[in-house]
Amino acid sequence: MNVLLVGSGGREHALAWKLRQSPLLTRLVVAPGNPGIAALAELADVKVTDVAGLVALARQMAADLVVVGPEAALEVGLADALAEVGIACFGPTKAAARLETSKGFTKAFAERHGVPTAEYGEFTDGGEAKAALDRFTPPYVIKADGIAAGKGVVIAADRAQAEQAIDDMLGGQFGTAGSRLVIEAFMTGEEASVFALCDGRTARLFGAAQDHKRVGDGDTGPNTGGMGAYSPAPVMTPALLEEVRTRMIDATVAGMAAEGTPYCGVLYAGVMVTPEGPKLVEYNARFGDPECQVLMLRLASDLLPYLLACAEGRLAEMPPLEWRDETALCVVMAAPGYPEAPVTGSRIRGTEADFGPEVTIFHAGTRRDAAGDLRASGGRVLNVCARDADVAEARRRAYAAVDALDWPEGFCRRDIAWRALSR
Ligand code: GLY
């Protein structure tokens, strides 16, 4: 099979690494990819939002399947454009991807279909939004409706901060993504990420992971795209996972089909385990990054036939997924200044050393310079991943690899998986 994979981060490096192992794979092209992916696939210099360019590339390489990594490609309708030319795509249409691209859509959808989530209100008018704060208690959760580079959620400690956040968002802080906003009740509990493969009618759970959103040890500092992850996540017990499957995932896939926007691709549920049970924090229409990296390390089954079955509406025919009975853990190494103002350009050495079969390093924001040296080119730069019999051993292996790398400027959190280890 010829596969086109769209994206350039650690998530796509992990997907390429797993797809490369498939005996069904003939040709793998990644657009635009990164230097780590270049060792596994052909790279094509086409941007993830260049729909016409990606469709032309898929046709020219006779792609049997296009796998979409980032939400940016979904938001501009890549899956719709591929459907028009009859190319199978793992990733939802623009309308179905509203589960990620519109917080207001998802809250209303959850209400229509009985998906458990926090009370909310949706606003385009600042006065109405501020008056509605009376219905909530601090801390106030204010969310821009659209995609705002992971920065569109404000947890305001008091009313003054909440009103400021409302003014900022409606005043254009996030462009059109903030011209509509959602206020919702604050949820207490532990958060985890739950994944499901979906083919429009059927869903299959694809594991759970726990991410670390804050930049600093002890969950301090600003929010990031994710500083590390591990899977499985002990907080997601089999009973809770079953509840998430029936009350969130299955209800959502059935609801999307009934509303004429069937959901195909991976559905990523951010779930808060509250004292009243699991509640939906948000949906994403893609794999999490770095959660995907740890899922790929744990997956024993061949990924490719499952992604194709989703794209072709045949997921129900597939045998159960098989997983390694191990924990996988990922430490994200970032450029100094991340997330506010990452300083790029520093040289990285040592990524190609042999760390043994349990350790895998995925590239995110890297590039090669004219001399062929590896340089940091983004905020999150490397994903140092390991798997082992338990979370403590996986963590020990991952940090040993981090410490062996020669990148003095890079930094990471030193406490990945602290929740699992403190149980
Ligand atoms: N790691 C969080 C995300 O992918 O959105």
Image: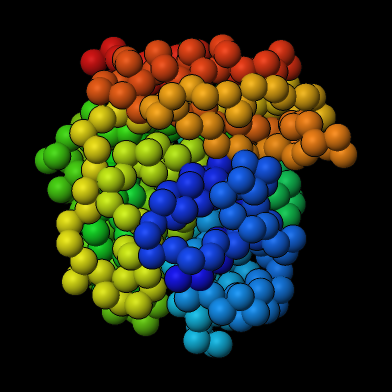
Q: Is residue 31 visible?
A: yes
Q: Residue at x 55, y 87 (%)?
A: 85
Q: Is residue 168 above or below residue 407?
A: below
Residue 402 figure quarter? top right
Which quadrant of the rendered structure holds the N terminus? bottom left
Q: Residue furthest right?
A: 370
Question: Left or right: 334 with respect to 386?
Answer: right
Q: Is residue 214 above or below residue 192?
A: above
Observer-nearest residue: 121 or 10? 10
Residue 55 figure quarter? bottom right
Q: Is residue 114 above or below residue 260?
A: above
Task: Residue 238 in the image: state x and y as whole percent.
Answer: 14, 39
Question: Left or right: 18 with respect to 362?
Answer: left
Task: Residue 90 in the image: state x and y as whole percent.
Answer: 44, 67
Which colour assignment does the render follow? rainbow
Number of marks drawn: 0
Q: Residue at x 36, y 21 (%)?
A: 394
